[in-house]
Amino acid sequence: MESFSADRLNNVKEYYFSRKLREVSSLINNGKPIINLGIGNPDLLPPETVVKSLKKCFINPKHSQYQSYQGIPELRQSISKFYKNHYSVNLDYRNEILPLIGSKEGIFHISMAFLNPGDKVLVPNPGYPTYKSVSNLIGAETVEYKLEQNNNWQPNINELNNINLNGVKLMWINYPNMPTGAHFQEDILKELIEWGRKNKILIINDNPYSFILTSSPKSIMSISGSEDACLELNSLSKCFNMAGWRVGMLVGASDKIKSVISVKTNIDSGMFYGIQKAAISALEISNSWFEKLNYEYSLRKRLIFKLAKKMSLKYETNTSGLFIWAKIEDSLINSEQFIDEMLYNKHLFFAPGNIFGSQGEGYIRISLCVNQNEIKTAISRLN
Ligand SMILES: Cc1ncc(COP(=O)(O)O)c(C=O)c1O
């Protein structure tokens, strides 16, 4: 029988982790003591005030009703304050902010709002796989731009100028970078914004890691010229340990936010009131939260370096975000072979670098979302 699925599914596969974690789960169910160092799923609790705010919202029946499509004004006001306090960016809460049910859905809404079938999109290689798969789902054409270690995994304007930009409407960037841990470099992004303006390409910075192991949080919207040339996605998943709560945001010029609202309001019917109130509590939290969080991640990071050394991997130490991006020294073994060997023989799971693009071949990504004891156990398995 012919496939019943839509043709658009010919261009996308099930998300790698959705597939591979089924295998990991079945190994666990068969009694294998797997330590999952593969995914960026924060394992620590959200701030106490966040949980308290949520708990208050179960009594009033109004709080169980559908909520505003654009998020309650109070949430947009607190996002506006958050951007002002942490990134020195002024945003009008009335029309320059759109709360999202996680930033991943924003990638879909943005693509739906700005891309016609056949339009071209610049996606990073290596990069978060969703930029490419969502573009494919909606019939846009992805054009990869290379990030290279010898250029600190930053976009290279000379290389971008060598690409045929005819039909390119949009460019995804992600600084601090996942999977490489490269920093947000203001001078480079300033140059990129000018390049985007010249070529009429909308640049979108996907920014969920700005508070994790950085010297200070940065937003592309703080760079002059970005106002009408860029959008930014942000998320509470990583910086407040709220990945499963699904809260993110899109910020930028009101005309572009309006286009995304036209898509989003036809797909979901708002976010649970309690989660919006909880998000407000998170956004209001003092800097000591981030200091405590980063202290824990810095201790884990040191242990992960030990683990990486035991596997004879090469890595940079001065990086941001929730991952260590490590190079396999043995050129005879590829990323997937390496992680399968570790999975089956040592019961350690890592993400193979090639799932982020061909430039990730020869690398693995190690997550910091694992407690110190488990990392020590992982190290001992390699003795
Ligand atoms: C680069 C990047 N963008 C977006 C996301 C999605 O985050 P959210 O939980 O806000 O949907 C992730 C999650 O891992 C990510 O690594």
Image (tube, rainbow, N blue to C red):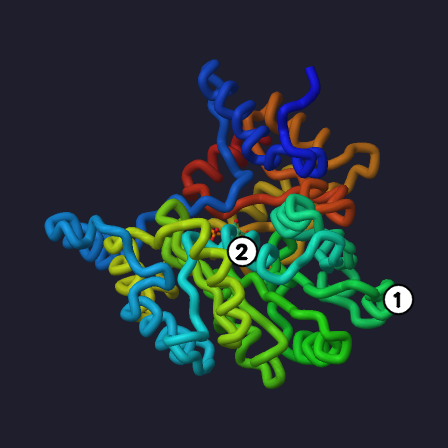
Residue under the point 65% across and 44% down: 137
Q: In which quarter of the image is residue 48?
A: bottom left
Q: In which quarter of the image is residue 371?
A: top left
**Residue occupied by mark 2:** 109
Residue under the point 71% across and 65% down: 169
In the rendered view, would you say 166 is above or below 362?
below
The answer to whether any part of residue 325 appears in the image is no
**Given the current orientation, which residue lies at the most extreme bottom position?**
224
Relative depth, front residue between 22 and 38: 22
- Give the position of the C terminus as an image quadrant: top right
Measured as percent of width and height from the top left, residue 128 is found at: 62, 50
Give the side of residue 201 with respect to residue 348, left or right. right
The amino acid beneath tag 2 is His
Relative depth, front residue between 365 and 355: 355
Q: Which of marks 2 and 1 is nearer the N terminus?
A: 2
SS at circle 1: loop
Give the side of residue 162 with respect to residue 67, left or right. right
SS at circle 2: helix
- Give the position of the N terminus as an image quadrant: top right
In the rendered view, would you say 158 is above or below 179?
below
The amino acid beneath tag 1 is Asn
Give the side of residue 279 with respect to residue 167, left or right. left
- Spatial CA distance of label 2 from label 1 is 29 Å
Residue under the point 67% across and 38% down: 8
Relative depth, front residue between 224 and 217: 224
Give the side of residue 275 with respect to residue 190, left or right. left
Q: Residue 192 carries which label?
A: none
**Residue occupied by mark 1:** 162
Residue under the point 76% across and 63% down: 168
**Given the current orientation, which residue lies at the most extreme left position?**
59
Which class describes the residues within 10 Å of circle 2: few (<14), some (14-19), or many (20+)? Answer: many
